[in-house]
Amino acid sequence: MAISAEGRQRQPFSQAGTRRGVLAGTGAGGVAALLAACGQAGTDGAGAAKTQAPATIQWWDQEPPAFKQFAEQWLPQFNAKNPNIRVEFSPRPPQWSEKLTAAMIGGTPPDVVAVFGDWFRTYQQQKQVIGLDKYLKASKFDATDFVQGQWKGMQWGGQQVAIPQYINPNVVFYSREHFGRAGVPFPKDDWTWEQLMDAARRTLRGTPPKPDVWGFTSGFANIAKYTCTVIWAQGGDFNDPKDPNVFTFNKAENARAFQYAHDLLWKQQFSAKTNADLGGVDARNAMFATGSVAISLDAGLAIQSWRDRGTTDWDIAPLPKGPGGRGERIAMDGYVITAGSKFPDQSWTFVQAVSDKEPNKLRAELALIMPARKSQLEAWNKVAPGKNLKAAFPSDAARPDPLGLWPKSTDVNQAITPIFQRYYDKNEIGVTDALKQAQDAVIGVLGPSAGK
C-alpha cells in the first residue's frame, strides 16, 4: 500500500495494465524510440513559485520494507514543513522499469522516481527527466557534500538531471573466522590483489570442486558491476577516460586486465563460480549466513543480508591496490523528476528535502545503505558496531557505474552481456575473441563512431 504524508493509504501506482499493449513486442531500441517520440521538453527549473499551490505528487522508491519504514518516519516531518504538498509513496512494483516506461509513454508517470543502472541513462537520453540547474541555483544547493564522481555522472546535456540518493560502492567482505583459522593476517589499507589471492589460497579449506570453504567469489559476468573493479585496478578500461561515448575494448592493454579477472575464476582454484559451488546459496548468504566463502567482492548494500540472516564473523577490507589503483566503482542511484510531472516545482521541493542530511542519515540507519552525502557517512559506519565499515568509504577517485554513463546503455549492456557470460561464466572463448566481439557488438548498437 502506498503511504502519503497525511498517513492515508492508496493502491500502488501502476499503469501497466492499461498500457502494456504499447510495449508488447517492443525491444529496448523500440522502447527508446517511443520514449523519444513522447519525450517532453519539460521545465528546466524556471517559474518556481515562492508560495507553492497545493499539490499531490507521487514518489516511487525502493521496494525493501526498510524504505517503507523510512517513508513512514520521515514523511510526517516533510509534511509539517510543507503542508501544501501531499506526497504519495509507492514501492517500485515488480517489473518497475517496464511499468514506468509505459507510464511515461502514456503521459502519467510518477513525479519523483529513484532510478539506477542502465535505465538511469536511458531516461535521461530520451528527455523523460527534467533539468535541475535553475532549481539548484535558486536554492543554493550544496553539491560539494556529494562524491563528485557520482554527482557529475548525473549530468546530461550540460545540466544536472538527478540528485544522488545513496552510494553503493564495490566492497571486499572477508571472514575473520576463516582468516584467523588459516593464520592469515587481516587485510591492511595498502594490501594488493596479489595479497588477496594469497589469502584466498590459504583460506580455501578442502578440495575443489567441493571444498568446505572457498577462498573467493564474485559475479564476474556482469562486467559493469563487479568485474570493472578488477579491470580498472589492473589498468584496463571499457571507454576513453574522457568520453564514455567511445569504447576501447580492443585496446592492447585491456587484454591483460580482462585476462587477470578471468584467471581469478579459472586459473586459480580457490574461486567459487556459481551458487551451486557455494552450497546452493548466493555470495551474500555464503559470507554472512553459511560461512562457505572467505572473501567476496560485492556491493556495500550486501550488509542488508547480514541484518536479516547474519551468523558469521565478517568484516570489510579496503579494495586491494593494483597498477591502476583500487578500481573504485560507485553505483548511480539517484532521484529524478519526470518530464511528465504536473508539479515539477513541488517535486523539486520534495527532492531537495529527501536529499538533505537528516534523510540521508535516517536511510542509512533504517536501510543500511551508505548515505550520498559525505557529511553523513559516519551514520553508515555505525550500523554494524565493531566492523570496519569505514574501509568502504569512497575516495575522490571513485568512478560512476559504467551503465550510468554509456549511451543507449540498456541496448549496449544487452549486446555485450552474453559475450562476457561466455568468457567469464562458461570459459568458452578467449580474451582476444571476447574483446573483439564486445567492440563489434557496441559498434553494431551505436555505430562506427563509438569505436574510433
Image (cartoon, rainbow, N blue to C red):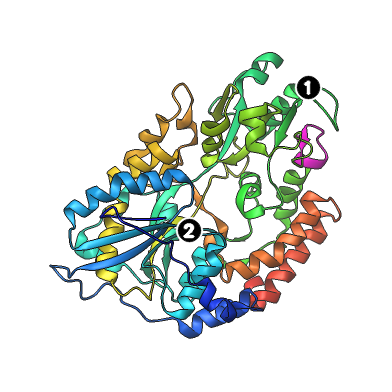
Please check the rendered image and state whether residue 39 is part of the magenta-colored stretch, yes or no.
Answer: no
Q: How many marks?
A: 2
Assign the N terminus to one quadrant of the image: bottom left
Label 2 is placed on what type of residue?
Answer: Arg
* Dot label at residue 205: 1
Q: Position of residue 286 (x, y in %)?
A: 67, 32
* Residue 107 appears in the figure: yes
Q: CA distance from mark 1 to mark 2?
A: 42 Å
Q: Position of residue 303 (x, y in %)?
A: 53, 35
- The image quarter containing residue 422 is bottom right
Residue stretch in magenta: 264-272
Q: Is residue 28 left or right of residue 18?
A: right
Label 1 is placed on what type of residue?
Answer: Arg
Q: Is residue 378 left or right of residue 220?
A: left
* Dot label at residue 92: 2
| Residues at discs 1 and 2 in contact (Cβ within 8 Å) | no
Q: Is residue 325 left or right of residue 394?
A: right
Residue 411, relative to residue 290: is it above or below?
Answer: below
* Dot label at residue 357: none
Secondary-structure class at tag 1: loop
- How busy is the neighbourhood of tag 1: few (under 14 within 10 Å), some, or many (20 plus)? many
